[in-house]
Each structure stands twice: as structure tokens, then as C-alpha cells.
Image: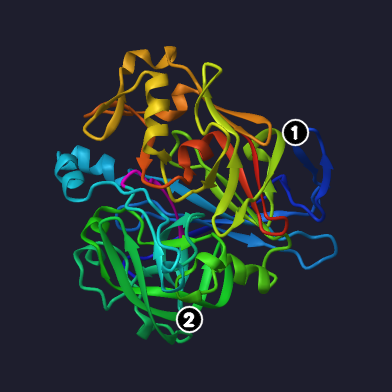
Amino acid sequence: MAGGYSLIVAIKQRRVRTVDRLYIRQHTHTSQITHPQASTGERVRQVTAEETRHQIMKWAIVLCAVVALSECIIQVPLIKGKSARESLEEQGLWNEYRGKFPFNPTRFGDQSLYVSNEQMTNDADLAYFGVISIGTPPQSFTVIFDTGSSNLWIPSVYCSSAACANHNRFNPGLSSTFKNAGKSLSIQYGTGSMTGFEGFDTVVVGGIPVKNQIFGLSQSEAPFMAHMKADGILGLAYPRLAASQATPVFDNMMTQHLVNQDMFSVYLTRNSSVGSMVTFGGVDTNHYSGQIAWIPLSSQMYWQITVDSVTVNGQIVACNGGCQAIVDTGTSNIVGPQAEIFSIARAVGAQSANGDNVVNCNNINNMPSMVFHIQGQAFTLPASTYVRQSTYYGCRTGLSSSSSNLWILGDIFIRQYYSIFSRAQNMVGLALAR
């Protein structure tokens, strides 16, 4: 492991709510689920890591009391750092980068690839990452917790690509618990690929060891990945999506009874570099207000739901008659079919320029909201949530087009709506984030 950690352990009480049973009350347009109160004896122990290389990394250790009515909640703090795009803009290299590696948000393509390969995106705007460790003794890595993919992979010492040189690399020879799986791994990106092999080892997430977890060790990585801030990716989608039929981390957490509830939830801060959180095994009521809207999945591969329509100023501008969308922490923007994205951009007053939908920074307060209608409920994104301001390139919307009919509700949406991913009920829960 490059660098080291000085750990400061603090035990604190939090009001974290978990679900023993989901009581479903059917209403005309929505399904509401009532959750019993969590045990008052819950305690969460958080561990923060001092600055290592160029990022401040935080992680959490959970104290689970082995007593009746206790609940096991695992919380992993996420850092909101500079995205690759922001760093490249500061260096005056953004135009050169996007010329070489044009953004391809597509996560889905040939269904036959799902057996041996996994499709992923080269998103330069991703900014949230957390810390995990792998091996005995542990080697630490920053990863994107990605609900749009299913594999865990990190760079290895066998990788000589430029993208590996500036990231932490796993050395299996230093881990007494590592086992080679004897399988190769290939993950295709919009502008390149990651290739390597698979192994088994202990993976620690939020201080909880996940035994015998399969993961990928890269031997080559696409050049654009040298600009990415995280070392690797921890996928949180369904096993059907996993390359090489690898068992995802959360599936092993459920199988090994490391979480009492087969769910996890994600909170993303809007501006602060700290405060974002992935909670495994429950819901943190500190991070949302109001009722949770529970939406059944339309497909169990991604976290895929049905959107009824998208409106601006009360008029349907996209998704007329319904469309399919995935809730995806591994994509930064709202992504949809080109014609539909163009329709939304035009409705909010954006103009196309150099691949972005740009707006006048002085008009943000006067721009309309875009509204996603899902299960009869309205999920509103004010202009302040979907417009991004750059010191060097002005203001642009977080709207991106793709060649697929499948929409992606990325970080822009999740920052506004606390997102709960229930494997027990195969539902996504959405509530207004605090």
C-alpha cells in the first residue's frame, strides 16, 4: 500500500433506522412502506483516515452489539473530491482530453457481453469515492460505489499502464489470504478497456470483513483512467450484470449475514467535500425528510424503474408514454436518448456548444425545473441542482445524450433524492435529501 493511515476512532450515537419488515400500504398512485423504529442501542463507530497521497480518505467501522434487538449498520463516508474534468480544466487540458476520449455514457449494449464482459462509462465528472481495504494485512484503495455495475476491481502491481502508475496497486504477494481464481476479466469502456484476472481475498467495507470476496486485478487500463481520482470500482448492481459471473460484494455481505437488512442507501452532498455516505443494512433518517416513495423495479439487473414522463413548465418534453431508467451512482449526469435530451435542454433554455448544453450563468434563478414523474409522484429538479458552473467554461446543464433508450438518473438526481436500494423487496426508495 502506498502511504499509511493514522486512524482516529470515535464512537458516537446516531439515529439510524433499519427495517425488520416492510409493511406495504397500496395507495391509488404510490406504495408507501412503514418501517418499525430501530433499536435504541445502535452505535456506529467511525474511523477517519489521514491524508494519503493527494486525497483525504474516510471510512467507518461499525460496532454491532451481539444482543437481542441489535441492528448492524455499516456506514462508509464518501469524499466529494475534484472530478477528472475539474482537474483537467484547471490544467487547461480539458479540450484535448475530451477530443481524445469523447464521453460515452452508455452502460448497456450487446446482452451477450454480460457473461464475460461488463460495459462501463468513461465519466470524467464522477467525484464521490470511499475507502475499502483488501488482503491480510490490509491494503487500502479508494473506490466508486457504483450501482450501475456489479464487479469489484482495483489496479494490481502487474499493471504497467500509465493509469495504474498514479493509483494505489494491490500486491497479492503481500496478502496471506489471497487466492488466484484462475479467470481473466475484461471490462469495456467507451474509449478503451480494463483487462486483468480475478482473485479471492478478504475485503473490508466500513470496518466489516467480507470473506472470500472475488475481485478483479487489472493488468492494463485505458489511458483515460489515468485522470480518474478513484483507484477502482465497487459494483452494487445485481449479479446478472457481473462479468465472469462474479459474486458482487453486497451479495456476499447478505450471504455472510453481515447486514440485518438486505438493503443499502446513498446520500450525496451537494457542495461539501464531506458528509456523503453509503449505509449498508438500513436507512439513515438524518439524511432525508418526508416520506419515502417506494418504486418497484421493472428489471433486476440494474436498479431499473419505470418513469411515467418528464415535464418542464407542466408540459411533457420527454418520456411521453413512459420509459425505463436506472438509478446509478456511477454516472454523474441525467442521461437519455439524444432527441429527448435535446427536447429537455431546449425547454429549459440551454444551447448546444462543444458537446455541452450550456446556459447563461446569470439566468439560473429564472430557469424552470425539470420534473420526473414516477409511480404517480413528482420528483422535481430545480435549475440549481441540474446546472453546473465551471470557472473556465461557464455554466452547463447536467444533461447527456446516448444511443440507448434506457435513461440514467445519475448523481444529479441522487443529490436531490436520498436513494434506498432494497434487495429484499426489489425496490428503490426515494426521499427528499436534507
Question: Could you tell me which residue is drawn at 52 percent across and 34 percent down?
Answer: 319
Q: Residue at x 45, y 22 (%)?
A: 383
User: In the image as oriented, which residue stretches furthest toward the front?
Assistant: 321
- Residue 96, disc: none
Q: In which quarter of the image is the N terminus?
A: bottom left
Q: Which of 332 and 401 is in front in this view?
A: 401
Cα separation between marks 2 and 1: 45 Å
For the residue marked with disc 2, what is the amino acid?
Phe
Start-end of magenta stretch: 124-131
Quick check: is 346 in the magenta stretch?
Answer: no
Q: Report if residue 434 is visible in the image.
A: no
Which quadrant would residue 295 be assigned to in this image? top right
Left or right side of 335 for 378: right
x and y, in percent, of residue 210 in the image: 57, 73
Q: Sequence order check: which comes first, mark 2 or mark 1?
A: 1
Regarding mark 2 in the picture, which secondary structure is present there? strand
Classify 362 as above or below 409: above
Give the residue pinned by disc 2.
200
Question: Which x, y percent locates residue 361?
Answer: 32, 18
Task: Provide the secondary structure element on which disc 1 rests.
Answer: loop
Mark 2 Cα-neighbour bin, 10 Å: few <14, some 14–19, many ≥20: some
Does residue 142 sit above or below 126 in this rendering? Answer: below
Callout 1 environment at 10 Å: few (<14), some (14 to 19), or many (20+)? few
Numbered tag placed on residue 29 in the rendering: 1
